[in-house]
Amino acid sequence: MVPAMVDSTFTLKNDTYVWPEDGVDTSQTPSEVHGGPEVVIVPVIFGFIFLVGVVGNTLVMVVIGRTKSRRSKSTTNTFILNLSIADLSFLLFCVPFQATIYSLSDWVFGAFLCKSVHYFVTVSMLVSIFTLVTMSVDRYIAVVHANKSPCIRSRRNASAGICIIWLLSFVFAVPVAQHQRLTRHRDAPNSSFCWEEWPNAVSRHTYKVTILITGYLLPLLLITCCYAKVLYHLHKKIKNLSKKSERSKKKTAQTVLLLVAAFLICWLPHHVIAMWVEFGTFPLTNGSFALRIVSHCLVYGNSCVNPILYAFLSENFQKACKQVFTSRLLTSGTPVVTVVRLRMENFSTTHSTTNV
């Protein structure tokens, strides 16, 4: 969960990462002393993002789950389904509880949820990010190593990859469950706060840097490299393209840039703030307060953008969506929908055209 602000002068916010005396400038801001408009505005904004993300990811899951063609069970669709599950879990575990931080002065959900909510927030966050990386590797193999692609990109390997993603995420998130505790502060003895308690600053710093590397820098590098290789292959190796194929290749390049930019922009402010808190002195000002809110919105927005980028921009997905719900309305039986793979499945491999 993205850190909320803590003030050591009694007007406390229920923070999730930072202790009051550690890395925070304790000068108060008027909005946090008196309870500004964010008490209402922030939960409303979070609620809108939550609604959009839940509807979008649920729709992707329903459409993929109800299609019965062989191609709908492709490796790419399997990863998209896993991405939607992770993003939906992230929104469900994170947004409602984070919204209460801006409207309530303490943690009211008890010790069990204090640990479990933050643990599963971290798990679902890592699953979402690792799935994005796996999808980029999957595209790289499908396009650049098309001859080996059928052997590597099997449903069995895709299922194994998803299991490894979830296992790694559960393991990486263990320190959160270990150190997240319901505690009290000396300036507010009658209030409970869900904070991290680490034995020393070194271990906390080490874990935060590890999450930065494994959950942002390394994924960003891998995603960028894989899609750069894809674009290079499409540009250099495929000759004699028709005008339609040229347009498709251009559309592919635009989609790739959107994917990389979305990941880069949505997660950058969160990690900047996290490192600022850990290794600097994060100020308590109206500007920093607004920056924190923006970082929340971008992180949650990434879980809303993913289904749009990976599914809804695909004409095939739009057709499948119409077919699923039209069949449901017109027939009483189980609809059998024929649908080709989603756009990310259709990056051209060895053929002379680029079908996107």
Image: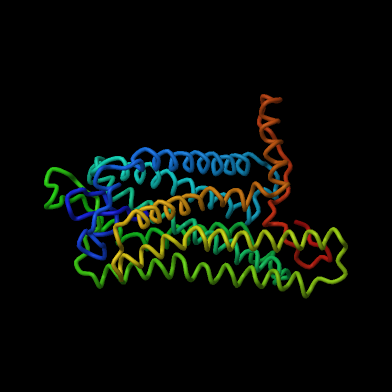
Work out whether 335 lies above or below 79: above
Q: State the residue at coordinates (68%, 69%).
A: 230
From the viewer's perspective, tell me whether residue 152 is left or right of residue 112.
right
Residue 145 rendering spot, x and y as whole percentages: 70, 71
Outermost residue, bottom direction?
Answer: 236
> Residue 71 or 10: which is nearer the viewer?
10
Q: Please indicate whether residue 96 sits to the left or right of residue 356 in the image.
A: left
- Residue farthest toward the front in the current orientation of the protein: 30
User: Colour scheme of this structure image?
Assistant: rainbow
Horizontal and vertical percent for residue 85?
50, 48
Q: Is residue 130 above or below residue 32?
A: below
Q: Quadrant of the C terminus?
A: bottom right
User: Which residue lies at the image location 19% right of the left edge and 46% below the top edge?
Assistant: 192
Total numbered labels: 0
Q: Which sits in the foreground, 124 or 42? A: 42
Find residue 227 and report its horizontal and vertical position in percent. 64, 68
Residue 293 position in % (x across, y down): 40, 51
Residue 58 placement: quadrant:
top right
Of residues 187 and 233, the one nearer the viewer is 187
Q: Is residue 224 left or right of residue 235?
A: left
